[in-house]
Amino acid sequence: MIEEVKNYIESIKKDTRKYAAIEAVANTEGGRVLVSGLKKDLIDTIDNIATNYKDISHVELVALSAKLSAKLSLLRSIELSKKNKELASEALEEAMKNTD
């Protein structure tokens, strides 16, 4: 049981560091450029799907959908990094409190 708690706490610490690193990137000029580019790419892909869905093949539609999904996942990771870091920090505090 104690080993499980230690592993859980280490996992939360690792997540907190990961979210902090992503947040640090998001707060740089390069991170802002990346987010802006991702948003533009998402809009362009949505426009491409909405405009051409009748004329493109199923394979092309699947490829565009996969591109959309990947870029959305990346954008969410960046934009939610601060919130995720805060939630992980709260979970860490709670876990540490419960081990005392």
Image: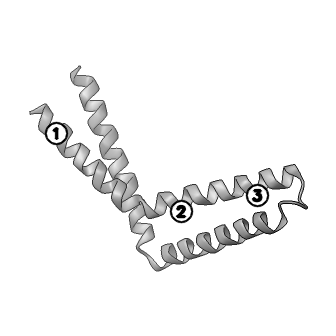
Instruction: Reply above or below: 25 against 80.
Output: below
Residue displayed at 64% across by 54% down: 69
The residue wearing badge 2 is 75
Q: Amino acid at mark 3?
A: Leu
The residue wearing badge 1 is 96
Q: Could you tell me residue 11's position as x and y percent?
A: 34, 39
Q: Secondary structure at mark 3?
A: helix
Q: CA distance from mark 2 to mark 1?
A: 31 Å
Q: Secondary structure at mark 1?
A: helix
Q: Where residue 64 is drawn, which disc sits there?
A: 3
Q: Secondary structure at mark 2?
A: helix
Circle 3 or circle 1, nearest the eye:
3
The quadrant where residue 98 appears: top left
Q: Compare residues 84 and 44 and report the one nearer the observer.
A: 44
Residue displayed at 65% across by 67% down: 42
Q: Could you tell me residue 1's position as x and y percent?
A: 23, 19
* Mark before the other along the chain sequence, 2 or 3: 3
Q: Residues within 10 Å of mark 3 (few under 14, many from 20)?
A: some
- Along the horizontal axis of the image, is 42 left or right of 30? right
* Mark before the other along the chain sequence, 3 or 1: 3
Residue displayed at 59% across by 59% down: 72
Residue displayed at 36% across by 54% down: 84
Q: Compare residues 59 and 96 and report the one nearer the observer.
A: 59
Q: Could you tell me residue 49's position as x and y percent?
A: 77, 63
The reply to whether dot 2 and dot 1 touch (C-beta < 8 Å) is: no
Q: CA distance from mark 2 to mark 3?
A: 16 Å
Q: Amino acid at mark 1?
A: Met
